[in-house]
Amino acid sequence: MKPSKDKLYSAIGEMIYVVAKSDGIVQDQETSKLVALLTHIPGAADIEWSFNYEKNKDTSVAETFDRALETCKTYGPAEEYAILFDALDVIAKASDDGIQPEEQAVIDRFKHELKEHFLTLDL
């Protein structure tokens, strides 16, 4: 069964958390950039809630990545992925040091696995 749109927005928040946390710590700049970014994004409340939930729980990056990826795969193709990909890049660039290798690796892996999944679907 296809997840709800709210569940997709939660997965977007989870992936943003994964990128922010992948270098070891969610930095204040990343959280601030997320809040600013969400002012014009559909599902902003669900995205922010999910991000903050994972951050406060300090959940495993690997576990959260897998859960978010599975939700996106199950949801199927969606225009919201463009928002997600942009948000991941913005959050990764938010720190003073720019995108860290760990952050780029997570972004690349997520995009690759999602693309591979959709290419194998018989839509």
Image (cartoon, rainbow, N blue to C red):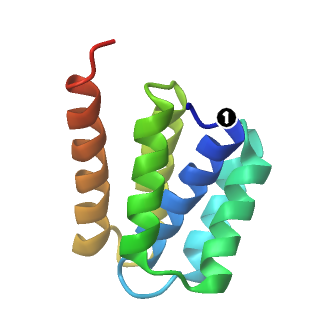
Query: In the rendered image, is residue 93 in sight?
Result: no
Residue at mark 1? 5
Category of crowding for the residue at label 1, using alpha-carbon neighbours closer than 10 angstroms: few (below 14), some (14–19), many (at least 20): some
User: What residue is drawn where x is 67% and y is 62%?
Assistant: 50
Q: Is residue 79 above or below residue 98?
A: above
User: Is residue 102 visible to the viewer in this orientation of the structure?
Assistant: yes
Spot the residue most to the front: 1
Q: Amino acid at mark 1?
A: Lys
Above or below, 51 against 54 in this view is above
- Please say if 32 is above or below 69: below
Considering every residue shown, the one lying at the far top of the view is 123
Seen from the viewer's position, the closer of residues 19 and 96 is 19
Instruction: Report the residue at 61% width, 79% height from top.
Output: 55
Left or right of residue 114, residue 47 in this image? right
The percent coordinates of residue 24 (x first, y second) are 39, 87
Residue at the spot 24% in from the left edge and 45% down from the top edge:
113
Vertical relation: 118 (above or below) 18: above
Q: Taking 84 as reference, is 3 left or right? A: right
